[in-house]
Amino acid sequence: MNAREVVEGYEAVLATSLRMRDAARRSEWENLVVLDEQRFALLRNLLAEDGGDLGLDELNQKKISLIHAILDCDVETGALTKVWMAELRQILDSIGTEKKLGDAYASSE
C-alpha cells in the first residue's frame, strides 16, 4: 500500500466514524453496531498495511490530522453511547424491580 492509499484508507475510516457519530446522535444503535463492524474491518486492513511513517511530510500531516479527527468522533460517539447505556440500564433495573414485585405478590395470593 503506497502513502496515498494509506491516507485514503484513513479518510474512509473517518467517513465511517462520522456516520457512527451521526447514528449515535440519532439513537440508531443497530446502525451504529453495523458501522462499527465496517470500521473495524477497514482499520484491520489498514493497520496491517500501514508501516507508520509515510515518508512525505504533507501526507504524514494529513494522516495525523485524520487520526485526530477519528479520535474526536470516537469521544463524542462514546459519550452518546454511555448515555444510552445508562438509560438502558435504568429500564432493565425497572423491569427487574417490577418482576420482583410481581413475583412477591403472586406468591402471597
Image (tube, rainbow, N blue to C red):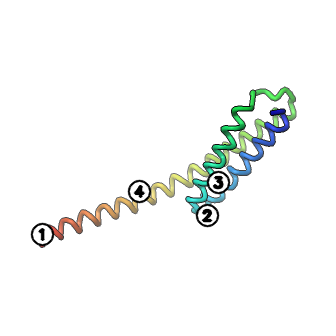
Q: Give the left or right position of residue 85, taking residue 104 as reference.
A: right
Mark closer to the chain start, 3 or 2: 3
Q: Position of residue 17 (x, y in %)?
A: 68, 50
Q: Tell me the kind of residue under disc 3.
A: Met
> In what quadrant of the picture does the C terminus appear?
bottom left
Mark closer to the chain start, 3 or 1: 3
Q: Tell me the kind of residue under disc 2.
A: Arg
Q: Are marks 2 and 4 in contact (CB under 8 Å)?
A: no
For image coordinates 81% across by 29% down, the residue present is 54
Mark closer to the chain start, 1 or 2: 2
Label 4, on which residue? Answer: 89
For image coordinates 66% across by 46% down, the residue present is 39
Mark closer to the chain start, 1 or 4: 4
Classify residue 89 by image quadrant. bottom left
Q: Nearer the viewer, mark 4 or mark 3?
A: 3
Q: Tell me the kind of residue under disc 4.
A: Arg
Label 1, on which residue? Answer: 108
Q: Relative to the observer, which residue lies in front, 2 or 10?
A: 2
Give the Cα distance between marks 1 and 2.
45 Å
In the image, residue 68 sits, relative to residue 17, either above or below, namely above
Give the Cα distance between marks 1 and 4.
29 Å
Give the number of the disc on residue 20: 3
In the image, residue 66 sits, relative to residue 50, either above or below, namely below
User: Which SS class for mark 2?
Assistant: loop
Sort mark 4 into few (<14), some (14-19) or many (20+) by Cα contacts within 10 Å: few
Q: Give the left or right position of residue 91, taking residue 25 as reference.
A: left
Q: Position of residue 85 (x, y in %)?
A: 47, 55
Give the Cα distance between marks 3 and 2.
10 Å
Label 2, on which residue? Answer: 26
For image coordinates 75% across by 27% down, the residue present is 51
Give the Cα distance between marks 2 and 4.
19 Å
